[in-house]
Image (tube, coloured by chain):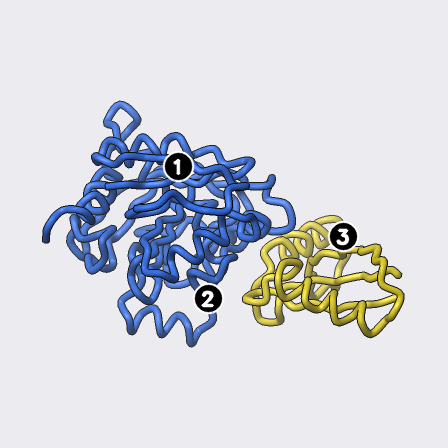
Amino acid sequence: MKARVQVMLKNGVLDPQGEAVRHALGSLGFDGVEGVRQGKLIELDLAETDADKARDTVTKMCEKLLANTVIESYQIEIG
Amino acid sequence: MKAAVIVYPGSNCDRDLAVAFERAGAEVQMVWHKETDLPAGLDIVGVPGGFSYGDYLRCGAIAAQSPISKALIDFVHAGGHAIGICNGFQVLTETGLLPGALMRNAGLKFICKSVGLRVATADSVFTRGLSEGDVIHLPVAHHDGNYIVAPDELKTLQDQDRIAFTYTDNPNGSVADIAGVLSENRRVLGLMPHPERAVDDSHGGSDGTAIFRAIAGLTEPA
């Protein structure tokens, strides 16, 4: 079973990398980009076959390691 | 004084930190990250700068999960002292021993230069050799030193006088110019600048010496 974890800086936390990308897009002539947020996508290959159990386990992984919940939020997609 | 310096794969300030402790009179043991226990009878543990685990995932995130870090957490919970410098500060925030997190510098560039630091509190074993308001100069060398902490936690840090150092000219966007913070029991210090790189005048300055001398006082009668 596959799981995808998307980790983003929380709303309200300034993302200096996203801002740099936004400026670069502007200088390339892409007008109207009002915001850019940059995050991470982590793909996991799990032996678990039960989706609910997989989600529980991945949630624990996020809380313990994959995200720093002081500054980041995460979303989990199973299957 | 007995000190240990943790060595993670990718640590690169571990020897400098050991020398700084030794010059202050400490007996120093290096401890590899796979060890599950710290040596007995330690007064302080140093978590050095560098790029533990290549900064993979987040700076300090994987080091915070290594076996020796669990021993470090137990040591601190039992009342032990610890100092985390640069990547070591990042490791200490990732373990939860210190509040907040260190994000990419606001200017996105790696910064490597000497900076001015104001001593924000002299009330700790790390800063008692200094006076509040004193300005010292230490080198910084980091890409992720932009300290962030939730507004309510920042207020707690301020109310409890736990901000140890502030930048005189904020190089990285840190909230409230914070360069170093103390734990609630004041026995753990995390700071981004490198005092261990400033203990010899031939290296451009020795302002870091005051911090290691203050720590060495741990074993001296008050």
Count of all numbered marks drawn on residues in the image: 3
Instruction: Name the residue that disc number 3 marks.
Output: A29
Q: Residue furthest bottom?
A: B152
Q: Chain of mark 2?
A: B
- Report which colour depicts chain A: yellow
Instruction: Name the residue that disc number 1 marks.
Output: B113
> In the depicted view, which residue is nearer to us: B163 or A79?
A79
Q: Tell me the CA gap for discs 1 and 2.
A: 24 Å
Q: Chain of mark 3?
A: A
Q: Earlier in the sequence, mark 1 or mark 2?
A: 1
- Report which colour depicts chain B: blue
Whether tag 1 and tag 2 are in contact, CB under 8 A, the answer is no
Instruction: Name the residue that disc number 2 marks.
Output: B149
Tell whether B7 sits left or right of B203.
Answer: right
Kind of residue sitting beneath label 2:
Val
Element on which disc 2 rests: loop
Image spot of residue A51 (x, y percent): 86, 71
Residue at 18%, 51% in the rendered image: B134
Q: Quadrant of residue A50?
A: bottom right
Label 3 vs label 1, nearer the camera? 1
Image spot of residue A22 (x, y percent): 68, 56
Kind of residue sitting beneath label 3:
Gly
Whether tag 3 and tag 2 are in contact, CB under 8 A, the answer is no
